[in-house]
Amino acid sequence: MSKAVTAALRGTRAQEDYLEQILTLIEDKGYARVVDIARNLGIAQASVTGMIQRMDTDGLVTYEKYRGVILTQAGEDIARAIVRRHESLAEFFALFGLDEKSIYDDIEGIEHHMSQPILATIQALTGELERQPALLERVKKKMAGSG
Amino acid sequence: MSKAVTAALRGTRAQEDYLEQILTLIEDKGYARVVDIARNLGIAQASVTGMIQRMDTDGLVTYEKYRGVILTQAGEDIARAIVRRHESLAEFFALFGLDEKSIYDDIEGIEHHMSQPILATIQALTGELERQPALLERVKKKMAGSG
DNA sequence: ATAATAATATAGTCTAGACTAACTTTAATT
DNA sequence: AATTAAAGTTAGTCTAGACTATATTATTAT
Ligand SMILES: [Mn+2]
Ligand SMILES: [Mn+2]
Ligand SMILES: [Mn+2]
Ligand SMILES: [Mn+2]
């Protein structure tokens, strides 16, 4: 018996990338500054300010001029869902020796297109494959042929 | 020894979705009409005309007013790459009993974010898992718990 | 306290990609 | 052949999300 969550738990791709960054910054450094969000996303500072203002309007963050940004509950929910998907993908592909750096852009895209059944599949499969080193080796061998 | 292909083999997400549809229509019916592209993508006819004109400028299709649309070599290359990725994803997730309809939107998104290593991994893994029915059953069982 | 530096905000611009409404061309009916 | 219907195009509008240049505020150093 688990409580059903009604919220959408989704934003646009850009919004989700911002939320992911904001959550990560808050957890890593205690606060999220515009300059850091901009640097991490490779986006101009002014663009970040603009987006944060729209996200405040949309109820995803709380923003006060020249003060920091914090997440609303809705924003945090989306952020955590995205981080979970990102980490699940990274863990899954790591099984096959793909290092996160080389597939980072892919993961950044895919994480926005994983409904519940696909997430559950990836996670369950990861769990099983961790106990199948021989199978993993065979997959790696095959991949070498198509590099 | 295989010939290296130099082309980018990528467009924007919208362009890739159009190219995928155009190729599919041409292969299925022999020609691609604006009205069918619009219907299949859920986009207004006028929007399709506009996009096709831009794609002609970009060298992805050849377009003549009131005549049909055909793919350039560059456009066809991108289209085939996308179709291959779409089919690889569908085949992979089918292993776990996910039917294509329920995950169609996800696949439509993910197919645009698969660099070569990820495609090779999915394909190689699919080949291995086809010979592991017991493992597939265990994964399905686990998934049932998180639905 | 003042001056210099860093961070943030505003204003204005641009592009992709969607929309609707109105018009034109092509295809099908009678 | 004339009429009607379907398909396609054009024109104009809108929004998200980026950019640069400039102004403002906050922070740090002197
Ligand atoms: Mn991510
Ligand atoms: Mn992302
Ligand atoms: Mn597809
Ligand atoms: Mn797609």
Image (cartoon, coloured by chain):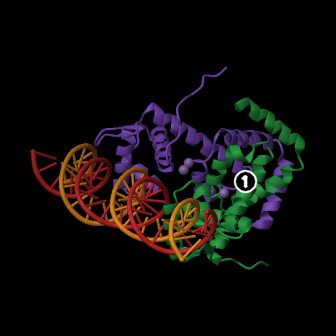
Chain colours: A purple, B green, C red, D orange
User: Residue at (71%, 43%) from the top-left corner?
Assistant: A122
In the rendered image, the quadrant that contains the N terminus of chain A is: top right
At mark 1, the secondary structure is helix
Residue nearest the viewer, comparing B60 with D10: D10
Query: Does the rendering let one see residue A100?
Result: no
Mark 1 surroundings within 10 Å by alpha-carbon count, few (fewer than 14), some (14 through 19), many (20 or more): many
A120 vs B17, left or right, is: right
Q: Badge 1 sits on which subunit? A: B
The answer to whether residue B73 is above or below residue C21 is below
Please state which of residues B126 and D4 is positioned toward the viewer in this rendering.
Answer: D4
Residue B10, position in %: x, y?
A: 60, 67
Residue drawn at x 78%, y 57% is: B123
Residue A111 image point, x, y percent: 60, 47
Report the residue marked by disc 1.
B89
Q: Observer-nearest residue: B136 or A7?
A: A7
Q: Quadrant of residue B13?
A: bottom right
In the rendering, at what x and y percent does residue D4 appear?
Answer: 53, 61
* Occupied quadrant, residue C12: bottom left
Image quadrant where one finds the C terminus of chain A: bottom right
